[in-house]
Image (cartoon, coloured by chain):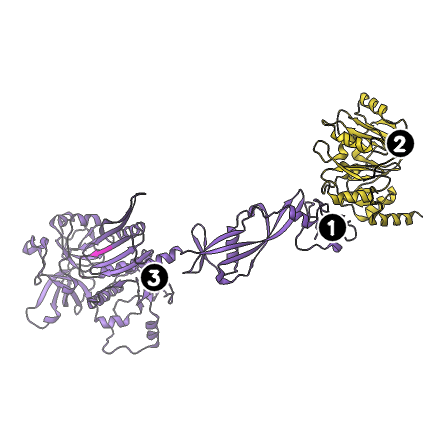
Chain colours: A yellow, B purple
Amino acid sequence: RLRKSEMAVRVQFENSSEVGVFSKLTNTYCLVGIGASASFYSTFEGELGESIPVVPITIAGCRIVGRMCIGNRHGLLVPSSTTDHELQHIRNALPDEVQIRRVEERLSALGNVISCNDYVALAHPDLDRETEEILADVMKVEVFRHTIADNVLVGSYCVFSNQGGLVHPQTPVTDQDELSSLLQVPLMAGTINRGSSVLGAGMVVNDWSAFCGLATTSTELSVVESVFKLGDLGQSAVAGALRTSLVESMT
Amino acid sequence: NEAGGARGQSYVTMEYMDVEAAASVNSPTVLCCECGTPIPPNPSGMCVACLRSRVDITEGVTKQGVLHFCKGCDRYLQPPAYWVACSLESRELLALCLKRVKGLDRVHLVDARFIWTEPHSKRIKVKLTVQKEVLGSTILEQMFVVEFIVHYQMCDDCRRRDASDFWRAVVQIRQKTSEKKTFFYLEQLMLKHNAHANTLRIKEQHGGLDFFYGSKQDARRLVDFLLSVVPCRYKTSQQLISHDVRSNVYNYKHTFAVEIVPLAKDCIACLPSATAKAFGNISPVVVCVKVATAVQLIDPSSLKMAEISQSAFWRHPFGSLCSSKDLVEYIVLEVEPVRFPGYSVAAARPAHKFLLAEVCVVKSSEIGLPGSQRYCRTHLGHLLKPGDMVMGYDVANSNVNDENISKLREDQIPELVLVKKSYGEKRKRRQKRVWRLKHLPKESDDIAGSDSMDHDYDEFLADLEEDSSLRQTVNIYKDPARLKRLKQGVPPPVGEDAEENLPQISLAEMLDDLCLDDSDSETMT
C-alpha cells in the first residue's frame, strides 16, 4: 500500500482537543463519532481514506465512541448499550476479517478500562473474567491486568501500538520497565494536549499515524512521533535504548 | 524540590531545579510540553520557567506603597491614626509594611524580609515569597520585591507640641480674694486626678490661673471637674477668628471664665440676714471652716454649722470680711468650756469636733499692758489651753467694708473672732517637714507678690499638716533629702524646745516619690 509520510496530525473535534474520546483507530479500520461539522471526519478521511475504511458511527446514541469500544485489527468489542441498528451499520462497514462482539460488562466504557494493540492488552484489574475471555478470543490478544501510576483506568492513562507506547507522566520507572516487558514494546512517560496526563483521551494511534489534539505542543508531538516511530524521526535515542535493553532481555 | 503534600499536590519552586536529584530511583523524567527540557513530572506538565512565563501569581499584589513618617518623633503612621515607633528593618516595621500591601489575601505568604536600602533614600524594600495554586493542582512559589516610599508627615503630638501658642479654648479661673490657698489646693487636686491633661499651656495671672486648650471639649472637661470640686460658677464667651464662607465653617476662640467663691478656710464672713435666718438664725458673723464642694461655715458663738452649696451661695453671694493678712496673734490666758442647756442640736448640724468655750486672751503685742484682756467665745475649745497662741481677727478695731455687716446691730457683731491655733514658728515647722508636694508646670509673667505667695503656701502646707481629711484628697510625697538628714540625726536648729504636739504627717500617709521621671507635665519643688 502506498502511504503518505508517516507523521502525527493535530486535529480538533468541535473545539475539543480530546481526540481519543471521539475516535478509535486501528490498523485496519477507523471509527469516528458523528459531529455537527464534517471537519473531524474529513481530516481522518484525508489521512487514512486510501488505506483503511473510516466509519462515522454512534454507540448507544453517543458520540464518545473512542471510550465506549475497544478493538484491534482482529476484532472489535462494543458495550451492551449499543443498539442493533448501530451494530448492523458497523458490521456492514468494517472488513470481514474483523470480528465484532457485543459484551455485557459492568465497566461498560470499554475504551477506558482496556488498552490494546494487535498482540497484547492491558485491562482494568476488576474486569470480568468473561470479558477477559472474550477479549482474548475475539481480539486474539494476551490480557494482563495492571494499573498505571496507581490508577485503574488503564485505557485512559496509557496508549500503545505495535511500535511503542506512552504512559502517564508520573508512572515510576520500575513500573515502566515492568509494563514494557509485559507489553513487549518500548514505553515512555509523557503528556499530551499541553500537559494533560489523560493520554488515552487525548490521542489515537496506529502503526503508521497518530492523531493528537490541537493543543498539543510541538515538544509533545515530537515525543509522540519518536516513541511510536512515526515520521522521519524513526528511532529516537530514548526508544532506541529501551529497545536494546528489551532485545537483550528477550534473547 | 518535589514533595507530595497532604493534598496530593506537587510544589514547583523557583529557588532551584535539581533534575538529577529529582529523577531519583523511581521518578521518571518527562519533557516539558512547552520547551522540551526534561523535568520531573508535575500536574501542569510544564517546567517551572514555562509555568512562570504563563502565570504571574503576583498580579493582584501592589508592588509600591507609601509610608508616612514623622521627623519629630521618629514614628511611622499606622492608619488611621496610630503612630508606632520602630527602627529600620525591625519586626514592627515589617508588620506595618505587610499591612500596607494590598492583595496579599489571595496568595499564601511564606516569607518576608527586608532588602537593605540607604537610610536617607526614603525607600524601604521588602522581599516577599508567596505561594499560589495555578492550573489545577500545582502550587507555584514566587519571590518579588515591594517598594515603599517614605513621606514625611507630622504626627498629632508633634503638631500639638509645635502649636503650643495656638489655642482654641481657655479656662480662666479667678478668685476675688488676696489669698491663694484655694488655688494651691486646687492645684493638688488637679494633679491627683490628672485633670490638666491635654492643656497646651498654664499661665499664672493676677488673681488666678489660665489653662489653654486646643479644643473646646477639653476645656469643657476641666470646667466640669472644677464644678465638682470647688464651689464656683462660670460664664462662656466666644470670639470669631475666621469664617469659611463656602463651607460655612466658623472658627472660634472659646473662653470659660470660672469664678471661685471668694471665701477661704479660716476667714470670716458676714452672711446676709436672709441666709443667716435660713440656717437656724445663726449669728451672721461666721468663720469659714472648709471650702470644698460646699462652703462650711461655723458660728463661733453658738457652734452651729452652716453648709452652703454652690448654687445657694451664688444666689446670695457674700464676701469675706478680713483677709489672712489681718490675722493677729493672741495668747490664751484662760479657757472655760461652755455647757448650757440652750445649745440645741436642731437645725444646724452639730459640730462634733469643735467645743464651745469662753476664753480670755490677750494680744501678743499687748501682753503685760493693763486692760488688754479680751473675752470671747470660740469654737476652738478642743484645741486651746492656757499659754497657747491663737490667730484671730480683731473685728472691733478693723475697718471692714461690707454691706451686710453695716446692716447689723452693734450687739450682733463680735469684737473678736478666734480662727485657728498657731503651733509655733513657721521656720521650725518648715524644718521639721519631711514631705513635699508636686506642682503644675505653669508660667508666670510677674514675680511681684512672691513673698505673699510663699506665706500663703506655708499656710497651705500647715493646713495640710493639721487637717487629716484635707490630706486624703491630695498626694503627699516623701522628701528623700530631708528624710536622710533626719535619719542621720542632724542636730536640731538652735532654739528649739521639745514641741511634741506639733501636728505631723505620718510616714505611712506619704507616697513614695517616683524619682525624677521624664514626664514633662510635673515639676518638683
| Residue shown at the point (26%, 70%) measured from the top left | B430
Which residue is disc 3 drawn over?
B521
**Left or right: A215 as drawn, with respect to A119:** left
Q: Nearer the viewer, residue B124 or B504?
A: B124
Quadrant in which the N terminus of chain A is drawn: top right
Asked whether the beta carbons under mark 3 and mark 2 sit within 8 Å of each other, the answer is: no
Which residue is disc 1 drawn over?
B37
Q: Which chain does tag 1 point to?
A: B
Q: Are marks 1 and 3 on the same chain?
A: yes
How far apart are the two marked residues, 3 and 2, measured between alpha carbons?
Answer: 103 Å
Q: Which chain does tag 3 point to?
A: B
The label on residue B370 is none
Residue B336, how many percent across, how many down? Answer: 15, 63
**Kind of residue at disc 3:** Ser
Q: Nearer the viewer, residue B39 or B478?
A: B39
| Mark 3 or 2: the one toward you | 2
B405 is within the stretch colored magenta: no
How many other residues sit within 10 Å of disc 1, few (<14), some (14-19) or many (≥20)?
A: some
Q: Nearer the viewer, residue B276 or A160?
A: A160
Q: Which residues are magenta?
A: B172-178
| Residue shown at the point (43%, 53%) measured from the top left | B82
Q: Which mark sits nearer the N-terminus, 1 or 3?
A: 1
Which residue is disc 2 drawn over?
A74
Residue B407, how many percent across, how many down? Answer: 7, 52
